[in-house]
Amino acid sequence: MAPSLQPAAAVEPAAQRTTPPAVVAPYDALFLYSFGGPDKPEDVVPFLRNVTAGKGIPDERLEEVGEHYYQFGGKSPINEQNLALKAALEAELERRGIDLPVVWGNRNWAPYTTDAIDELERLGAKRAVALVTSAYSSYSGCRQYREDLAVTLRERGQLGPDGSTGVQFDKIRSYFNHPGFVQGNIDAVLDGYAALADAGGTGERARLVFVTHSIPDTMEAASGVGHATYSEQHLSVAGLVAAAVSERLGHDVAWDLAYCSRSGPPSQPWLEPDVNDHLEALAADGVQDVVISPIGFVSDHMEVAYDLDTEALATAKELGITAVRAGTVGTREPFVRGLVDLLLERAALARGEEITEATTGDLPALPSVTGPNSCLRRHEEPTGIPALCSEDMYQ
Ligand SMILES: CC1=C(CCC(=O)O)c2cc3nc(cc4[nH]c(cc5[nH]c(cc1n2)c(C)c5CCC(=O)O)c(CCC(=O)O)c4C)C(CCC(=O)O)=C3C
Ligand SMILES: [Fe+2]
């Protein structure tokens, strides 16, 4: 069964617009908040130091990851992809007649969080809404952004007891089950099936392997306080995408969820199976064609370019599997439109209006103001670091 998707919002050209533009009050800026990545070889080591500060990632793993970046000329595609998303959001806002500046910043590379706050202040913003480039909730995709924002404000002397004393921040909910994100993935997977036929595979009979970033089991447990966990959120999206693709192709598509990019010591359990091991198991079962869909990521950044396009596709080749990697949602139209819908939804909520969150599938919308101890790094182990956009900033 196909997921029930919202009908497309009719878009009027600005010149002929008769309806007034949607209200984004109380917000005066949209903060596009991402991970960041190196732009040139000299950036790689300082970037990795920023990412791994205090995380106990083994040196061998860091050298290995540094090598991934050097193989791509020391430049991650992520910054250009975020600039493209920023431009797409600006275009969509303009199409809807919404006058709202978009400011981009990253946790781990320039423009840094503090640069973005400077920019927001320069624009005179008083209350911004943060859109994080991660669709699912977990420490890495949710709380870490909220902590870095709080710590940056604290360093600037702008963190009051209940939040910022400078620019105020709200956050758009984790949007994995928003219709726009799901539809963007459906479209990308269908394109993947078409590409597989061109690549010489049997096309429509191919196995569908969804992939996301592995996280430690204890981070997984902490991701689901009061709601579905990180892996359950992915399973829901995967099921929706597979159902829509099956319907379109006219037969049931077999699918699985696998993981990439694990780090940490081998003794520490992380979510499995690894995508490479999984391809091996599929080959042993006689599977010959695979479409890989990276539903865990919103753009084709380094994890996708290296761990999937370089490593997993090489594994498939060695195993005699014809594999194609489907795209991420990137700047696909349903996704970008959905993000602006989410912004409007968050603004209505901030104004105290009754809202019905748009969702697809069985899982309810995640809260945009998280409960206490939500998305901790390790289950039941408070980080002791303040985090914005939660019911209690210090839990
Ligand atoms: C769930 C998740 C997402 C998806 C959500 C989202 O999209 O935000 C994500 C995204 C990203 N992760 C990225 C890069 C890295 N992540 C690392 C380390 C880690 N990631 C983790 C999780 C996630 N990460 C975890 C549990 C660790 C272990 C350390 C820790 O507990 O935090 C390391 C250190 C070395 C290594 O261990 O690999 C690097 C370099 C980049 C930039 C890519 C580019 O440059 O194009 C992006 C978008
Ligand atoms: Fe990561």
Image (cartoon, rainbow, N blue to C red):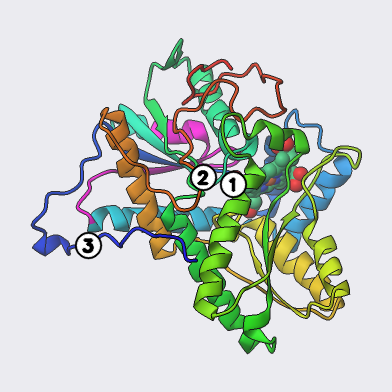
Question: Which residue is the site of mark 1?
Answer: 233
The spot of residue 344 in percent (x, y) is 30, 43
Residue in view at x 81 percent, y 37 percent: 57
Foreground disc of the pair 1, 2: 2
The spot of residue 381 in percent (x, y) is 71, 20
Taking the image as shown, residue 63 lies to the left or right of residue 36, namely right
Between the C-alphas of marks 3 and 1, the distance is 31 Å
Question: Which residue is the site of mark 3?
Answer: 11
Taking the image as shown, residue 110 lies to the left or right of residue 14, namely right
Q: Dividing the image into four quarters, tell me where ligand 2 lies.
A: top right
Residue 38 visible from this viewpoint: no
Boundaries of the magenta span: 96-119
In depth, the one of 282 and 265 nearer the eye is 282
In the displayed structure, 161 sits above or below 379; it is: above
The spot of residue 114 in percent (x, y) is 49, 30
Mark 1 Cα-neighbour bin, 10 Å: few <14, some 14–19, many ≥20: many
Mark 3 Cα-neighbour bin, 10 Å: few <14, some 14–19, many ≥20: few
Task: Say whether disc 3 or disc 1 marks the residue closer to the N-terminus.
Answer: 3
Is mark 1 in CB contact (under 8 Å) with mark 2? yes
Asked which quadrant contains residue 333, the reply is bottom left
In the displayed structure, 280 sits above or below 106; it is: below
Q: Cβ of disc 3 within 8 Å of ligand 1?
A: no
In the displayed structure, 274 sits above or below 289; it is: above
Quadrant where the C terminus is found in the figure:
top right
